Image (tube, rainbow, N blue to C red):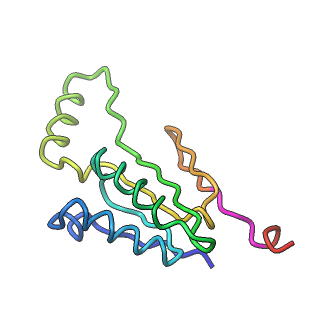
Amino acid sequence: MLTLQFIPYTEIEELSPARRVHKLLEVVKENKIVLLEGRLRREEEADLIQITMEHITPKFKGIEIAVINPEQKSDNLLRKLKLNMMSFVLGDRMGMTIIGPATIVREIKRNPEKIELYTVDEKRKRK
């Protein structure tokens, strides 16, 4: 069974960067795919990857992570201004971060029209 857990940004915004990373990693280690409102800072992403490497076991193989940001390309001056204001006001809340355990998520692909989340086929894995 595939479990997705949505974590609103308000649930992690008051946490220290280290605690944010540990909270997300705890959820992923429960074999859940995290859908985080917003995104982590670059340093937090790097810390998440580093801490994940320290927690690798035969049961926990690591993570797959993807960050999706709203498209900022626009020829319309008013639209650019609006996106810049939203980015200033919302900060790290814009976009979405997907984090999943490598034992379940094989790959995450992004393109302008969709997100493709490839999971491990349990039937093939057993053979």
Q: To which quarter of the image does residue 47 belong?
A: bottom left
Residue under the image location 23 percent in, 50 percent down:
92
Residue 1, relative to residue 49: is it above or below?
A: below
The answer to whether 76 appears left or right of 117 in the picture is left
Residue 106, relative to residue 83: is it above or below?
A: below
Q: Residue furthest front?
A: 54
Residue under the image location 36 percent in, 36 percent down:
71
Q: To which quarter of the image does residue 78 belong?
A: top left
**Residue 31 placed where, x, y %?**
54, 75
The quadrant of the picture occupied by the C terminus is bottom right
The quadrant of the picture occupied by the N terminus is bottom right
Residue 92, relative to residue 30: is it above or below?
A: above
Residue under the image location 57 percent in, 45 percent down:
109
In the foreground, 11 or 95: 11
**Residue 88 placed where, x, y %?**
13, 41
All told, the count of numbered labels is 0
**Residue 51 placed where, x, y %?**
40, 60
Residue under the image location 25 percent in, 68 percent down:
19
The answer to whether 57 appears left or right of 74 in the picture is right
Q: Residue furthest right?
A: 127
Q: Does the stretch in magenta take in 41?
A: no
**Magenta extent:** 118-122
